Amino acid sequence: MKKSIYKIVIIFFILNNFLYANIIESQPQIIFELEKLEASNENLEIQVDFNKAVLHFRKGEYKDALRLFEKTSKVFEAPSLLNMGIIYYKQKDEKKAQEFFNKIYSKKTNLINQPYSFISSCYYLFEITKDDKYMLDLVTIFQNSKKLSEYNELITDIKDAILKELANRYLMIEDYENALGALNAMSYSLDLKKAMILIKLNNFQKASTILKKIREEEKNSEILNKVLWISAYSSLKQNNFEDAQEILDLINDRKKDFNVNIQMPLEIFFNKDLYTYKDYYKSIMKFDEDRMYDFIYYFAPFVFSDSKEIIYDSVKGFIYGKAQSVENLENMVEYNTKFIRLVKQDPIKRVNELKNIIKTDSKAYIYYNLALSYAQINDFTNAYKNFEKAYKLSPGNKLYSVMYLITANKISADIPEKQRAILDKNIKDSGGLYSYFAKELYKLFVNSTYNVVEASQSYEKTVFYKAIDFLKKMNNNENLSNHQLLEDYERDPFIYLLKLVQKNKNEDEYRYAARVQDAVTLKYNNNFLDSSLITSKYYIDILRAFGVFSRVDFNIDGNNNPSYLVTKAYSDLYLSKPLTSIETLKRLKDEFGYENRFTMYLSTASFLESLRPEEASIQISLIKAFYKDKDTDFLTAIQLLQNMNISSAKQFLVNKYNNPYIDFRIVGFEEFMLSL
């Protein structure tokens, strides 16, 4: 491994503009043995000729320079040959240049007597031949540079040149950690370059600190404009709107002479690499807020009555308080019979049929079941509307109350403070249906300091109780490998995946990764589509966390279920097939009426990925109009900022932006970073 890394370092030590060439041209007094010069007037004349040759060299009078260097090479051999080689190199005559550099390199005593010339010849020979042996010589020289202590300044300058070029080579392969390491090893600091690398490493806070210092010290107006633009970008990436607005004011003050937005424009784009393997791994092992919501919507019970509750468990088909299976329920009332049939269908089809059941005098539980079904297909806006209807029809059902409240929070719905206070009081009060579940969900999603004192009664045997307990233990960083939820319901596809990724007590990292990779199905199958989209999204995140996403075949011949098509559109987008995603999403809308904030953002991402920004902008406008989505405000600000409508842009910088699909970047960022 070390040998491999060392080889990469050597190969990346190619310099396009060698620093020493500039030293030779600007400093004609090359190191030589003064004692020999003092003994002869002829040698003094040779020294004068050498300096004349260097002057011709600097003026580009190469013919005269070569004639004099030929003469001086009899006394000042290595410096004269070096400058002759450089002249031929500048004239693109690499064969002739190589001949002169080889004369210096082949005489190993030059390393001691003429280190300037020897080191320089090594560089040029490597540049011409790309032969690693010359770079290996240089590495050896630098490792023993203490023996050349009188040439420390030269060695330092050359090391800096190498490290800077090495940093650029690391940047070209997006190895930002090593690029930063190379820059940190230099004798002087390239602060702007470091700040830009820190941005690529998502260390925006440290980058902003460096950028602020540069803004205070930079005198070059053109560079300062770029620093301000990059500073604004860094602050926006942090959702630090206070700093961003301050920087935007500075840009606005310089608006007359500011054109960086033309040279390095801001653009929105689909960032399929927004998250790393580590990010995906963290997301499957400890849920973020979005997945916690999905988890609860997946395990929350369907309800069949507004009085004495009968709960359908969506995972196993069990009925709370009884041992009957789904089939035994088909003798119940008309709605229950229809619903039992519907829960076996594709989740998206289920929603469409449940909508048809709704009547003007429908019961609360009918709206609740429709709301929960909407939530399970990522249509949270319609879920919120129907949870609200269920709550208003039956406020005594605490489950309706809390699901209404947490879904409102999820979509950032504007519930008046008075209404929120009533909801809070209703959930916290004792008594009422599902009071225990409501209070546990309230603590998980609304107020973590709330103390649940209500007894769980006989809920302990339900899957919803175990699911809530699973989340509580996950939040407390407890071991989940033997949790009752995973033991009792392993046959459920989502729970199977949850259990699969739990690390065994005596399992090292290698064995753990190998086990999961071997166990994960590399041929996508219907088992992960039977319940909810949370299963397919969780499955895909496992694949990405363990580096096998690109190896999976997501095609299921003959499967036209809408939930599968959603998964296909989602996976195709990340597999660089945006046109296929667009077609699939259109089909979902036309055939199944399936369109919501989630699919519209997938469409936006697909349009951006297929280089159709105008259609992406239309989608963003529609999302804003239909859902009052706060992410669209931020994206609007980015577009206004690009057009230098700074005052208008600032008005939209209110809500933190954390969209998993649409990112923003500075075009030409990498090229400018390399040029520094």
Image (cartoon, rainbow, N blue to C red):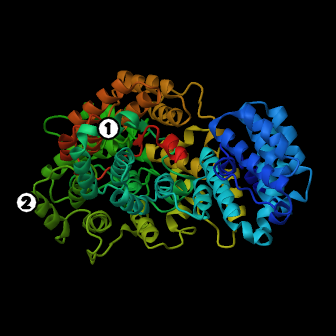
- Residue projecting furthest to the front: 41
Mark found first going from the N terminus, 2 or 1: 2
Q: Give residue 225's position: percent from left, percent from top.
A: 34, 46
Q: Is residue 238 left or right of residue 287?
A: left
Question: Mark 1: which secondary structure?
Answer: helix
Looking at the image, is mark 2 or mark 1 nearer the viewer? 1
Query: What residue would you read off at disc 1?
Result: 597
Badge 2 crowding class, 10 Å Cα cut-off, few under 14, some 14 to 19, many 20 or more, is few
Q: Give residue 270's position: percent from left, percent from top.
A: 44, 37
The quarter of the image holding the N terminus is bottom right
Q: Is residue 103 left or right of residue 65?
A: right
Residue drawn 80% across the image and 71% down it: 147
**What type is the residue that disc 2 sits on?**
Lys
Query: What residue would you read off at disc 2?
Result: 418
Quarter assignment of residue 399: bottom left
Q: Is residue 196 left or right of residue 380?
A: right
Callout 2–callout 1 Cβ contact below 8 Å? no
- Along the line of sight, which residue is nearer the eye, 612 or 261? 261
Q: Give residue 141's position: percent from left, percent from top.
A: 80, 62
Residue drawn 66% across the image and 50% down it: 19
- Along the line of sight, which residue is nearer the eye, 375 or 234? 234
Question: Mark 2: which secondary structure?
Answer: helix
Q: Give residue 485's position: percent from left, percent from top.
A: 50, 63
Give the tally of numbered discs. 2
- Along the line of sight, which residue is nearer the eye, 25 or 564? 25
Q: Is residue 459 visible?
A: yes
**What type is the residue that disc 1 sits on?**
Arg
Badge 1 crowding class, 10 Å Cα cut-off, few under 14, some 14 to 19, many 20 or more, is many
* Cα distance in 3D space between marks 2 and 1: 28 Å
Q: Is residue 181 left or right of residue 631?
A: right
Quarter assignment of residue 131: top right
